[in-house]
Image: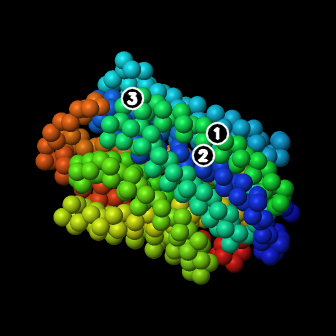
Amino acid sequence: MTGLDRRPAAATDATLPRGPLAGFAAGSLGMGVWVTVPGLLLLYFLTDVLAVGPWLAGLALLLPKIADVLLHPWVGHRADVEQTRRGDRRRLLLLGCALPVAFAALFAVPGGLTGAPAAAWVAVFFIAGNLLFAAYQVPYLATPADLRIGYHERTRLMAFRMVVLTLGILVSGLLAPLLTGGDAATRGGYQRMGVILAVGMLVAMLVGVAGIARLRGSAPSTATAGHSGWRALRVALRDAQFRWLVAAYLAMSTTTHLVLAGVPYYAEYELRAPGLTTVLVAAFVAPALLVTPLWLVVARRVGKQRALLGAQGAFAVGSLVLAVGRPAGLPVLIGAVAVLGVAFAGMQLLPFSMLPDVIRAANSDAANSDAANSDAGGTGAGTYTGVWTATEATGAALGPYAYALCLTVGGFVASTAGESPVQPDAALAAVRYGFGLLPAVAMLAALLLQRRYTLDATARTTT
């Protein structure tokens, strides 16, 4: 009998104290900076400050993510090895705390570099940052599956994380454009922004490491050794529920990062007011601070799956309004972005709390299996989480790349800081439709994929 799943559900449904919950969530404050700022500013930084063509800029953001597809599952395996050998994943978390260094370097492009050399600089430090982010994110997100807690408590834990993550996204999304110099952004401004935000990242991530240690003391780990290496990866990928959840999340991650990358362009070229970048970011992110507790209530009443389908549908509808553009009127457009923000809160909370449900269900099936020599053995939370974060990283690259392709097709003209080239009408149309119509289509695809996930009803009563 394992310590995982042969207990009645009530025995696993402990309530976590708020202090350790808050400490755990604080780690997401630093992670939120990495999730937000490169997605918001890096494509614009390349095309409008470093004179990198949009196709090359998109490629510079996409190629580093290819490495993530292999690196994140490997980091997940190492996290499981650490858990088995040491009883925790602390060493990987501390390694990940070097992420702020890579973040600062990402925007510290030497003054003489423009075009392809500047794109190469950004790509190299983007790869380094993504690896360090994985070292922190994978063991961090494995925590809910490690702890001896139940279905609703896992949602509560991730709700704390989501509120703080949202705060990190909001603060960094508002501060970053201001620290770069706003409408008069310069290389020096981007460098200053990178250093200031990196300091805040480091403090928050260290607090998160301490919070995870306290949580593990409050609800001892249920993690088991299970399979390792490529065998563990095969087991995870053969899990049909996991595959559908991951596929839907890939579409969601791609869509939300596409929207984030398009915000500066939509503000400058469609709304003709670059200063509205901050307003749009606030309208997108701020609602999550208010509605995350409401999503928690909805998930308790109707289940995580049905709540997530509702969030995806709302996102698609809001995106279609944005495709109308300036004729819809600024208040309507800001309202549509706020709808996207409400949906985004649900799409962050719910999938991340469904992931540990999948892991616990998979290990429960393995514990009850009599096929000792088959691939039915358990798989550590790190392996599942490594695949999940690789998927998230892929979406974070595909979104900006898809938007960059839209700009390329429209004939968008790249420039350096201080230049204001006249954009062709096709480029202006690409800015608008790439920000509205394309996200709507992608989110509808996510909704159709999400409908194939069927675990939720069982997870509510057994895990």
Q: Position of residue 7 (x, y in %)?
A: 83, 71
Q: Earlier in the sequence, mark 1 or mark 2?
A: 2
Q: Which mark is residue 202?
A: 1
Residue 366 is at least partly visible in this image: no
Q: Residue at x 29, y 67 (%)?
A: 331
Spot the residue most to the bottom.
301
- Can the viewer see residue 310? yes
C-beta proximity under 8 Å, tags 3 and 2: no
Q: Is residue 109 above or below residue 269?
A: above
Looking at the image, residue 177 lies above or below residue 98:
below
In this figure, which residue is indicated by the disc labeled 3?
A: 187
Residue behind mark 2:
30
Instruction: Give me the C-alpha separation between circle 3 and circle 2.
Output: 23 Å
Residue in view at x 60 percent, y 42 percent: 201
At mark 3, the secondary structure is helix
Q: Residue furthest top?
A: 112
210 relative position to 318: left or right: right
Q: Which label number is shown at residue 407?
A: none
Q: Quadrant of residue 165?
A: bottom right
> How is the protein colored in the picture?
rainbow
Q: Residues within 10 Å of mark 2 (few under 14, many from 20)?
A: many
Q: In the rendered structure, which disc, 3 or 2, sits on the residue that comes first in sequence?
A: 2
